[in-house]
Image (spheres, rainbow, N blue to C red):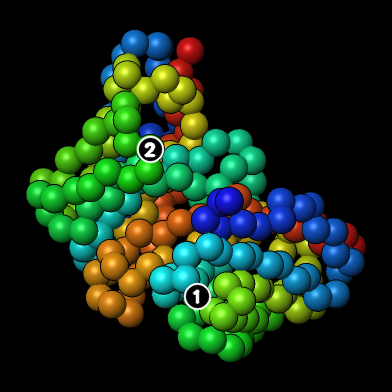
Amino acid sequence: QKEVEQNSGPLSVPEGAIASLNCTYSDRGSQSFFWYRQYSGKSPELIMFIYSNGDKEDGRFTAQLNKASQYVSLLIRDSQPSDSATYLCAVGKAAGNKLTFGGGTRVLVKP
Amino acid sequence: DGGITQSPKYLFRKEGQNVTLSCEQNLNHDAMYWYRQDPGQGLRLIYYSQIVNDFQKGDIAEGYSVSREKKESFPLTVTSAQKNPTAFYLCASSTRTSGGREQYFGPGTRLTVT
């Protein structure tokens, strides 16, 4: 079992719809959770982080964390063609600053 | 401008040669990291350093070496012992405070070894 798992996609979403991405993790000691967006050929860009159970909203993005079920999700509202990218989930533990990354979910927003 | 720079953007080497990738940051971050990304894959940690003159192996350190002589710099050497060195190499940095574990990435170096 991988430490951090994501559906590789592609997740095809009509423009204006909500894109829902999921990420599960295996280590119950995980404390911090991050979503990165990576355009083809570019480096990852941090878009959201969440440390506590519940929802965290930032513009069109909402991160949801459920530590009991060991999953974290990302919602993208009003999806735009510019949201087409690969979204990487990363999980960190309390000790040290190491992050473990999932394989990424590719999102395609169709006009 | 504050940020992380990596050079060069593209690097081509012959098999059997060592090559050093540069990573510099002016964010005053204590911690720095090197990742490798293969096509269609996530990121895998090679080495990381939380303080000057100290570094630890990540998940795939074999065939790589690093140094951390200055806070701003964390160069990575890909040695001839690395069996599959062709990849996209990403450098990142973060603060060491308990609440600030977000990592920020440089633009990356794409290494091709033939």
Quarter of the image with the N terminus of chain B is bottom left
Q: Which residue is mark 1?
A: A49
Q: Say which amino acid is labelled 1.
A: Phe
Identify the residue at image location x=57%, y=72%.
A70
State which chain disc 1 sits on.
A
Q: Residue A37: x, y in percent? A: 59, 60
Identify the residue at image location x=71%, y=56%.
A7
**Number of numbered discs overlaid on the protein picture:** 2
State the CA–CA distance, disc 1 to disc 2.
Answer: 26 Å
Q: Residue A80: x, y in percent? A: 78, 68
Task: Look at the numbered disc 1 and give the secondary structure of its residue.
Answer: strand
Q: Say which amino acid is labelled 2.
A: Ile
B14 relative to B2, above or below:
above
A55 relative to A79, above or below:
below
- The one of B36 and A83 positioned closer to us in this rendering: B36
Q: Tell me, yes or no, if residue A13 can be seen here.
A: yes
Identify the residue at image location x=85%, y=64%.
A13
Task: Look at the numbered disc 2 and give the secondary structure of its residue.
Answer: loop
Mark drawn on residue B73: none
A90 relative to B99, above or below:
above
Q: Which residue is mark 2?
A: B60
Q: Residue B4: x, y in percent? A: 34, 54
